[in-house]
Image (cartoon, rainbow, N blue to C red):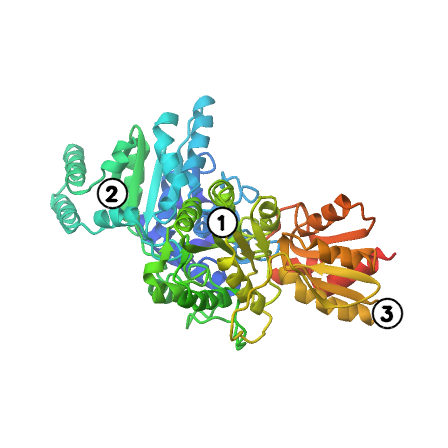
Amino acid sequence: MGRFLDVIRSSGDIKNLGIQELSELAAEIRSEIISVVANNGGHLASNLGVVELTLALHSVFQPPRDKIIWDVGHQCYTHKIITGRKSVFHTIRTQGGLSGFSNPAESECDPFGTGHASTSISAALGIAAARDLKKEKFNIVSIIGDGALTGGMAFEALNNASSVTDNMIVVLNDNEMSINKNVGAFASYLSNIRLNPGFIKIRKDLRTLVKSIPAIGKKMLSAAERLEDQITYFFVPNVFFESLGFSYLGPFDGHNIEQLIATLEKAKHMEGNKLIHIVTQKGRGYSFAEKNSSKFHGIAPFHVESGQSREQNTSKIPTYTEVFGQALIRLAEQDKRITAITAAMTEGTGLKDFAKKFPDRFFDVGIAEEHAVTFAAAMASQGLRPVVALYSTFLQRGFDQLIHDVCIQKLPVTFAIDRAGVVGEDGATHNGVFDLSYLRMIPNLAVMAPGDEQELQAMLKTAVDYGGPVAIRYPRRSSVGLPVAESLPEIEVGKAEVLCEGKDLAILAIGSMVFPAMLAAEKLMSNGISATVVNMRSVKPLDGEMILHIVKKTRRIFTVEENVVSGGFGSSVAEFLQQNNIPVHITIIGLPDEFLPHAPQEMILEKYGLTPEGIVKAVLGSAN
């Protein structure tokens, strides 16, 4: 007999499978996910943890009529496989292939696009409101992890739910993890439910007793279920969910397909809003991911047999993330005012060693970027120098707090913005290509970008001593390869640096594009073109004196940035030239006004001309 997976073409095909057959299918799907992610990279641990849950959901509900909404969406690989995308699953996260997240453009079984945490309950409520207004009949299920439930937006939606609808299901997938171990009071609350030994033992004993009764009738079974519910209410402190208008069911073993199907069926026919609490294991079925779910949360291609990366990186060059983390430790050793704040991204932002060395000065606030920003602002108001480390795409979520709580009050908060620019395979929701645009318009905020690792260290030193808000953005890649500076000098904010002099044109570069601009200048020289290259260092304040100095020598200026051209660095230069009535031919090289597809960094940078060759092509093209 062949694999069950080979005959699954849609989720309807699994409805005729028995429990044992579904269990075998779950094992086959796990093997398929491990194999493909080992080739392509991707989110492994979270997907291995929800295989049984996904099969149970599709056994009970009927998408696309019924709506299944995955929070974040990076755990929807099984969902994709059984909703008609099995034949192309091997393309996931590759250029032109499947997205690594829920994507309505791929399938009508994905009712809502996702990518960031804590959105699923709000989305489910919006769909429920539309359904009820249109007097339609279908089920809506939101699946949210306990990590995503630390986000304020999830609580806002829970609070609003009973005012919107009385017919939706929330599945709380409790695995004690987001990317790292969850923090905060709510994580402790769930842990108390999950680990209550009295509840777990009595529920187990009750089920054993019921199963031992021969030919149990419907009335007896119903009575046993009611007794189980009463035991739940007695032992589980579920007042929180009940007070929000949700009937609480759980906690249940999230890998027991039979129990999951029975619970989902029960919830489907219950009146009112329901919350089903399940407990799963991140990385289930792959020992390396079970032991180190943080490493296998999002991982590059790896060898299945050993769990080791296929990319044999023997380079000693640190990433910008690593440079930031070590520089912050050096600064914190000298300055006790420095604290570090992140939002469930301790390892991803390079703060793991800082957290170990300065546990009292490190704060992981959970998936709560808005809170992180205001928390830092208040800390700064009391004389400290907080450094908030977030990914560029996630800082967007704290935009109002950045304006209202930090910049209006001119508070000395430093924002270390990781993953700025093109990120790659995670696609549109994760590329940090807007920060120069949305940051430079905010008064009182200095916005800088280092051209190499030494500048990153110096900018960090400058920022914590600056006396006002500063944002430093840097990319997700290895640094240039310069030696670590023995001391950490400061850089004058808003002061650019000429790297090489030329007479024919000038290339003004910012951040990650400084090194490519230098290489482009060398290539242009072989074409008989002499170019000045300026490391602008700062988008705001802009070094107007440097620009005035440049335009005295040449009237051909090229700006280059790893950011959208709309409102970015090049726009700031063009605005300065226009405001000063300087007639100059300016070409802005950057990313287009569109959301970038998922593909390797190198491919995207090459496609949009953000390479030495691309800069040369733009220069030569403008001369024609």
Element on which disc 3 rests = loop
Secondary structure state at the residue bearing disc 1 = helix
Which mark is first along the chain, 1 or 3? 1
* Mark 2 residue type: Gly
Tell me the CA gap for discs 2 and 1: 32 Å
Rendering quarter of residue 61 = top left
Going by the numbered disc 3, the residue's amino acid type is Gly
The answer to whether residue 16 is seen in the rendering is no
Choose the circle earlier in sequence order: 2 or 1.
2
Q: Quadrant of the N terminus?
A: bottom left
- Most foreground residue, 422 or 142: 422
Q: Position of residue 200 (x, y in %)?
A: 17, 49
Mark 2 crowd level (few <14, some 14–19, many ≥20, 10 Å Cα):
some
Q: Nearer the viewer, residue 514 or 191?
A: 514
Q: On the rendered structure, is 341 left or right of 19?
A: right
Quadrant in which the C terminus appears:
bottom right
User: Which label's residue is closer to the chain start, 2 or 3?
Assistant: 2
Q: Tell me the CA gap for discs 3 and 1.
A: 44 Å
Discs 2/3, front: 3
* Gap between marks 2 and 3 measured at Cα: 73 Å
Residue 70 placement (x, y as % from top left): 43, 44
Query: Residue at 26% across / 50% down in the picture?
Result: 188
Instruction: Name the residue tied to disc 3.
Output: 528
Q: Residue at x 49, y 61 (%)?
A: 36
Task: Using a 10 Å C-alpha cutoff, classify the residue at mark 3 as few (fewer than 14 neighbours), some (14 to 19) or many (20 or more).
Answer: few
Q: Which residue is mark 2?
A: 250
Q: According to the image, label 1 marks what residue?
A: 394
Closer to viewer: mark 2 or mark 1: 1
- Give percent across and percent down for residue 442: 58, 44
Q: Is residue 279 left or right of residue 549?
A: left
